[in-house]
């Protein structure tokens, strides 16, 4: 009788484990909340995804890494993000290729995200762009190309949208297209 009870117990345990494993593997993995907020490649049908994935403060493939901030004389607040995510696209418009980058940084709370944005606003000379709920600056890259940067804060997330092209008008158009795609994604 004791052997039957132990055998039934082992069988129930094994069955329970099998069901749990089946459910764990049958469910699709959920994407990072930041990945769900990132610029979708579908916003630019003629694009090629250059890179996409999580960011760390030490990684050199995004603007808020420790080396970039120190060189620009920016205080440490922007470095204190808890989670980062980035998307890079090469967009071809039939004549030229431009680069579109979207970086998302999650902070402990909305106040910290706002302080990080304020540090960038001061350092980069960003000007308020109320119609999109953010701050923007235009400039030139090291080769004379047009460069536009837009910073937005959504709760505890700081969003940086950077577009690099050859002509100012085309670069602004791509930035506006990305802003519209993000507004639709964020439900704004």
Image (cartoon, rainbow, N blue to C red):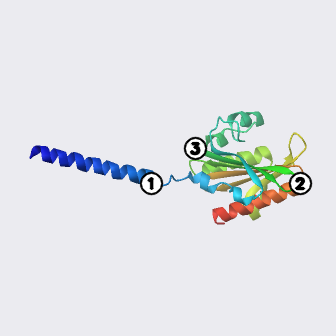
Q: In this view, does 121 lie above or below 180?
A: above
Counting from the top left corner in percent of width and height, residue 94 is at: 86, 56
Residue indicated by mark 2: 95
Q: Is residue 55 left or right of residue 2?
A: right
Residue indicated by mark 3: 82
Mark 2 vs 3, N-terminal side: 3
Residue positioned 64% across, 62% down in the render: 186
Residue positioned 70% across, 59% down in the render: 42
Occupied quadrant, residue 175: bottom right
Q: Is residue 111 left or right of residue 165?
A: left
Q: Distance between the residues labelled 2 and 1?
A: 45 Å
94 or 75, which is in the foreground?
94
Q: Is mark 1 on a helix, strand or loop?
A: helix
Q: What element carries label 2?
A: loop
Counting from the top left corner in percent of width and height, residue 89 is at: 74, 50
Occupied quadrant, residue 132: bottom right
Counting from the top left corner in percent of width and height, residue 17 is at: 32, 48
Q: Distance between the residues labelled 2 and 3?
A: 39 Å
- Number of the front mark, 1 or 3: 1
């Amino acid at each position: 009788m004791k052997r039957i009870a132990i055998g039934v117990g082992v069988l129930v345990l094994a069955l329970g484990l099998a069901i749990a494993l089946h459910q764990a593997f049958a469910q699709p993995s959920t994407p990072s909340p930041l990945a769900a907020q990132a610029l979708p490649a579908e916003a630019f049908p003629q694009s090629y995804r250059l890179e996409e994935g999580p960011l760390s403060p030490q990684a050199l493939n995004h603007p808020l890494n420790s080396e970039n901030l120190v060189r620009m004389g920016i205080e440490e607040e922007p470095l204190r993000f808890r989670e980062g995510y980035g998307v890079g696209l090469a967009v071809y418009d039939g004549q030229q290729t431009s680069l579109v980058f979207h970086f998302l940084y999650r902070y402990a709370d909305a106040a910290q995200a706002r302080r990080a944005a304020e540090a960038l606003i001061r350092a980069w000379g960003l000007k308020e762009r109320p119609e999109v709920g953010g701050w923007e600056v235009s400039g030139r890259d090291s080769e004379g190309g047009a460069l536009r940067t837009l910073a937005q804060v959504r709760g505890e997330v700081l969003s940086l949208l950077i577009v690099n092209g050859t002509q100012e008008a085309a670069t602004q158009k791509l930035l506006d297209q990305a802003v519209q795609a993000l507004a639709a994604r964020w439900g704004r």
